[in-house]
């Protein structure tokens, strides 16, 4: 288990180079935190003035949760403070190394007690090193005198190699490489709940937009609100009836689905995920769905389909509203379901993954193009009622029908 991290700041690299809306320095610290580090030792070979500028760049960032210990070439580090009997490993890497936190965690799990494991082909090109925490004082002393270069470390044992195939790992050795690493980083962060339309259409359209918005102060919650606004505008278009208005509504719904991909991408790249953000996302998604369903009912009625079309649209909207608390409950008790196992939890997981994909948006657009929105209306109005009934029964059977998840404390956790 990783309890500390040594982040090296050699002079030949630029810690304030921005990748994905974050400086390499911030990205290194946040990744170390995500890997489990409670203390980050920042070993700098820069001048005192340059190091002071680096420290100022971190001021006021609420994402910083670890204790930061800055060390220059001549400074004596404090004694390490292990967090418990299992917190016995330290992660070391240079600031230009961009990697996924799960690589560091898996590297630590692979390392036996008192063993040293590294990612890299040879001692001189190690990208990440995990070593026993008791070796930290010796390692820090060597790294301070080695110009904050990872190759100069003394880990106290022979280094074993860890195969990093399948993990994201990149080096921003010069600022001109930042754009390429940023693009690769985005490609490495897929959402496991993506449907076919998300994977083959929405994500391909969302990533260029994400890279643009990463350079702005917009937060994921701002982007969620933007996605909701586009979706509601699309729902309003369906009220126009006829042929062109529903098509425009379908196109705006599809655009809303693309923007809805962006908020999660920005959150993951900038380490801005939060329970509140996830709740806002699903709440506003549900609002858009309800508005679209009502709009489709009005569109079918205005197209002369049937006088009961608005009632079907209303039933569909009510069904979507009833689904909302059960879907939220399923998502908030997901870890409980994984621990329990069983067929009920497996079915719940598949149902939620299918529902939270955005594939239905393309179905609405296609139905509008061929003037068969009534087909969507009938199938969805029946399907949504069946869905929430089955989900409620399965949650009850799995012991996950817990209304306490809607407390304010749960949202802020």
Image: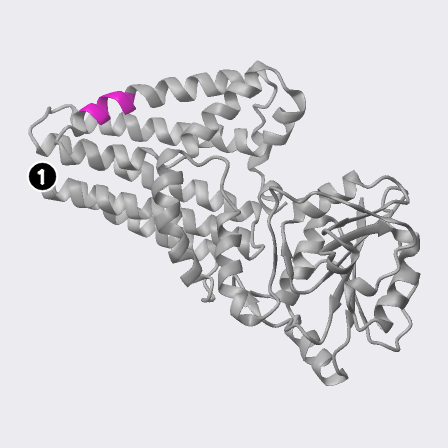
Q: Which residue is drawn at the image coordinates 51% and 44% (left, top)?
A: 278
Residue at (38% x, 34% y) in the render:
196
Instruction: Describe the element under mark 1 as helix, strand or loop.
Output: loop
Looking at the rendering, which quadrant does residue 317 occupy? Answer: top left
Q: Which residue carries the number 1 mark?
A: 243
**Residue 25: x and y, percent?**
66, 67
Q: Quadrant of the N terminus?
A: top right
198 w.r.t. 13: above or below: above
Is residue 239 visible to the viewer in this orientation of the structure? no
Q: Is residue 412 left or right of residue 321?
A: right
Q: Tell me which corner region of the image, top left, top right, bottom left or bottom right, holds residue 155.
A: bottom right
Residue 344, x across and y down, in percent: 55, 16
Q: Magenta segment, which residues?
A: 375-381
Near-viewer residue (200 or 389)? 200
Of 301 and 226, nearer the camera is: 226
Along the horizontal axis of the image, is 303 left or right of 350?
A: left
Q: Is residue 356 above or below residue 56?
A: above
Mark 1 closeness class: few <14, some 14–19, many ≥20 residues within 10 Å:
some
User: Relative to 344, is 267 above or below?
Assistant: below
The colour scheme applied to this rendered structure is one colour
């Amino acid at each position: 288990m990783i309890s500390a991290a040594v982040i090296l700041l050699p002079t030949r690299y630029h810690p304030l180079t921005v990748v994905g809306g974050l400086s390499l320095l911030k990205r290194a610290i946040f990744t170390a935190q995500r890997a489990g580090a409670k203390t980050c030792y920042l070993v700098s070979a820069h001048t005192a003035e340059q190091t002071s500028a680096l420290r100022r760049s971190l001021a006021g960032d609420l994402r910083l949760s670890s204790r930061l210990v800055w060390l220059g070439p001549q400074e004596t580090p404090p004694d390490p403070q292990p967090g418990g009997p299992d917190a016995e490993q330290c992660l070391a890497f240079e600031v230009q190394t961009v990697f996924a936190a799960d690589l560091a965690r898996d590297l630590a799990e692979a390392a036996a007690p008192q063993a040293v494991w590294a990612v890299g082909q040879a001692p001189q090109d190690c990208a990440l090193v995990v070593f026993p925490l008791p070796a930290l004082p010796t390692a820090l002393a060597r790294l301070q005198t080695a110009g904050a270069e990872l190759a100069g470390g003394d880990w106290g044992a022979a280094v074993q190699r860890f195969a990093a195939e399948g993990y994201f790992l990149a080096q921003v050795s010069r600022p001109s490489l930042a754009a390429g690493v940023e693009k690769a980083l985005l490609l490495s962060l897929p959402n496991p709940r993506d449907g076919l339309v998300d994977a083959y259409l929405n994500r391909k359209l969302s990533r260029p937009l994400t890279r643009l918005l990463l350079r702005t102060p917009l937060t994921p919650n701002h982007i969620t609100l933007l996605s909701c606004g586009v979706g509601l505008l699309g729902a309003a278009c369906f009220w126009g009836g006829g042929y062109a208005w529903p098509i425009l509504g379908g196109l705006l719904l599809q655009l809303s689905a693309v923007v809805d991909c962006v908020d999660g991408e920005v959150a993951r790249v900038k380490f801005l995920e939060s329970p509140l953000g996830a709740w806002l996302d699903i709440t506003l998604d549900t609002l858009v769905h309800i508005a679209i369903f009502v709009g489709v009912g009005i569109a079918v009625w205005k197209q002369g389909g049937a006088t009961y079309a608005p009632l079907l649209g209303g039933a569909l909207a009510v069904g979507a509203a009833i689904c909302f608390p059960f879907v939220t409950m399923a998502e908030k008790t997901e870890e409980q379901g994984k621990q329990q196992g069983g067929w009920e939890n497996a079915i719940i997981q598949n149902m939620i993954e299918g529902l939270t994909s955005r594939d239905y948006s393309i179905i609405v657009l296609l139905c509008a193009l061929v003037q068969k929105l009534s087909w969507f209306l009938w199938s969805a109005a029946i399907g949504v009622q069946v869905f929430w009934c089955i989900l409620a029964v399965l949650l009850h059977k799995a012991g996950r029908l817990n209304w306490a998840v809607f407390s304010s404390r749960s949202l802020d956790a």
